[in-house]
Each structure stands twice: as structure tokens, then as C-alpha cells.
Image (cartoon, rainbow, N blue to C red):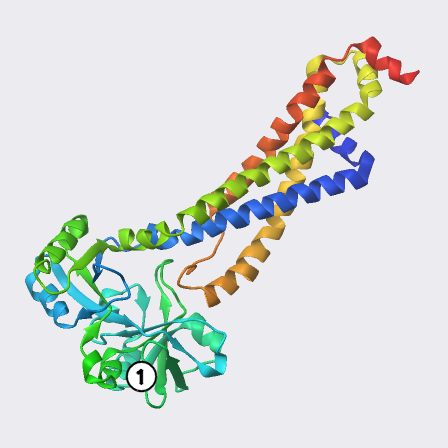
Amino acid sequence: MTLVGLAARNVLRNKFRAVLTIVGVAVSILTFMLLRTVVYAWTAGAEWAAKDRVVTRHKVTFVMTLPKRYIDDVRTKVPGVKVATFANWFGGKDPKHDKEFFGALAVDPATHFTVYDDMSVTPDVLEKWKADPQGAIVGDVLAKKMGWTVGSKITLVSGIYPKQGDWEFHVVGTYDAKSKSVDRSTFIFRWDYLNDSLPEARKDQIGWIVARVTDPSRAAATGVEIDKMFDEKEIQTLSQDERAFNASFLASFSAVLTAIDLISIVILVIMGLVLGNTIAMGVRERTNEYGVLKALGFSNAHIIWFVMGEALVIGGAGGALGLLISYPFIEKGLGRFLEENMGAMFPYFRINPATTALAIALAFGLAIVASVIPALQAGRLKTVDALKRLA
């Protein structure tokens, strides 16, 4: 029997306290992994952004539009741009599912899926879409959630683009993702259908431009050239590579992300305190036993490792239970819900392997840290003082 093996058996001497402590560690690990996964998924769009895409928007704010003629200038007058597309945020909602939120975009059918080649669409679906002015391609996750199939007739309403009558569409197919940053819950339809239905004053306006460049290392420089070209126009632009563009959205949530980081640290501190308290109580209860062990020839180091072994068993058991709960809860439960309902912010909500490794290391590491003081106290006990507890 090794010291760690003996410590493992000793953990169950007070089963109720051991179980509560292990559950406490498991809940802490689950909470830590959930918070870290939120941060990881939230920043994934910036981390996995394409290096060769440049986004151009109105200089003042993203919600203001640009003249459609700007896309022609980007395509023909900016060196290094190999293809460019444009889109408008439609803000549509299905009256039959009025509580369900999803992104709806009016896009250029000729170039959208060329620029966004990480959205996978079969050639036959693409041809049907280009031939149907009211055709729509939807994300596979969105289609499954809403119960839409190929041929479904969809009616949307839009607060941004109100219309006499409803906006009617036909689902011609779905797309899936080749990249973790792609939102699979977007409704995509043809921009010309939107533009032809608008009053004259609102025609020929686009929300933003996205260009693919030949040299990814010059993406930022290409953005500067685009903005320079429009400096003397009536509307100025702001261009950023896709990673910087996505990061600019995250900047508005920086306080939230910082708060999540702080909370995850607090959770770890609480876990350490729970472990430390359990180990300290066990040491006090078994002081006389440590005296007997010393009288039998066990050294101070043996006693210290005995106490630390007990902490490692509790920490490891709690960590394992936490991981066992985390994967189905985060990936199959909460993750699926967020991907279906908040795909724009959480397109890929999965546990990062690095988070799992960190959680395991922390479970054992904090167990050792929490047991240091009780272990040293037990190791420094004098045999005579410890044996007095037998009287």
C-alpha cells in the first residue's frame, strides 16, 4: 500500500464530507470551463477571421449606408483587390416564429459566395438561387431549428425595410460552414429583390463592402487605399481587415470579458478554500493517528505526503466529475442553444482542448496549494504532543 493509496482510502472515512467537497470541486470546474468557453467562443470570430478579407463601412457608423457605386470603384480602382461583394442588414423576422432571432442579409448573388468561400453551397443550389429573384439560402442550423426545407415559402417582416405587403421568399437550399467563424444561422437572399422593392429615395444603397485581396499581408494597406480613394467623396469610409473588424465589435464588450475573467479567478479561489478547509479538518481529526505513525518510524515527509495525497485524490475526483458534467452540459446543451439562437456572437460554442488541460492542471495544482499549510502543520507535529490526543 503506497502513501497515496492509503490517502485515497482515508478520504472515504467521512463519506458525507468527502462527497460534498468533491461535488464542490466539480461545480467549480464546470463553472470555470463554462466561463472560459464563453470567452473562447466570443473571441473566435476575430481569431479565425480570414486574413485576406477587408471590410469597408460608413466612417461614422456601421448602420449608415454607402452608395452602391462605391463597389465599382473598389473592384476597378484599388490594386490588389481580386473580388469584392456587398450586403445589407435586413433585420427580418418570421411572424410565425416571432421570438426567434436570426441574421438576414441581402447580398450580391454574383460574388457573395466567392468572397465567403468558407460558406459551403453546392453548385446546383447556387444556380437555382441565381435564377430565382425571391430565392433564399439559409444556414443548416437555422433551417433545422425553424423546420424549413427546400421549397419552403417564407414570409418575413422588417422594421428597417417596411413593405406594402410581406417579403416573400423561397428556400432553394442551405449552406454549411468550412470555418469555425461562420454563423450557420443566417438567412441570405438576393440584394436586387430588396432594391427593386424600395422607394426611389432608398434605392441603390448598400450596407458594407467586403473585398478579397491577392496578398493577405497587405490587407491593412489595401484598406487604407480604399479609404483614401473615398476621402474626397460625399461619404467617407472606414476599412479594416476582417480580424480587426471583428475585434472592433468585441471592444465594446471588453468590460464584460474582463468581468468573466475575474469571476473565473474568484471561482478558483473558492475551490481552493473549500479544499483547504476539508483537508484542515481531516488533519485536526487525525492528529493522534499521525502521532502513532511517527512513533512507528514514519518521517515528517511521509506525513506531509500522506496529507497531500488525500488532497490530490479529492481534487482529482472533483476535477474528473467536473469534466464529465461539462462536456454534455456545455457542448450538447448550452452550446447548441447558443449556436442556434445567437450564432452571430457564438458561431462555434465548443470547449477548447486547452481549457480542458488547464482545468485538469488547476484541479491538481490547487489541491496541492490548498493542502500545503495543513500538511506542514501535520508534518511538524511532535510525537508526544500528537499522542496526547489518545488520552
Task: Look at 58% across and 47% down and name the residue there.
Answer: 31
- Of all residues, the one furthest to the right in this rendering is 391
Label 1 sits on residue: 135
Q: Position of residue 22 (x, y in %)?
A: 70, 41
Q: Is residue 25 above or below residue 68?
A: above
Query: Based on the displayed image, in which of its 4 quarters is residue 134 positioned?
Result: bottom left
Q: Is residue 91 above or below residue 330?
A: below
Q: Is residue 333 above or below residue 67?
A: above
Q: Amino acid at mark 1?
A: Gly
Quadrant containing the C terminus in the rendered view: top right
User: Which one is in front, 277 or 382?
Assistant: 277
Task: Look at 76% across and 34% down and name the residue there.
Answer: 11
Q: Secondary structure at mark 1?
A: strand
Q: Position of residue 97 (x, y in %)?
A: 49, 79
Query: Based on the displayed image, in which of its 4 quarters is residue 228 positioned?
Result: bottom left
Task: Look at 16% across and 65% down and name the residue there.
Answer: 83
Q: Is residue 178 above or below residue 33?
A: below
- Whether residue 38 sits left or right of residue 240 in the image: it is right
Q: Position of residue 159 (x, y in %)?
A: 36, 77
Q: Position of residue 178 (x, y in %)?
A: 34, 62
Crowding at dot 1, Cα within 10 Å, few <14 / some 14-19 / many 20+, comes out as many
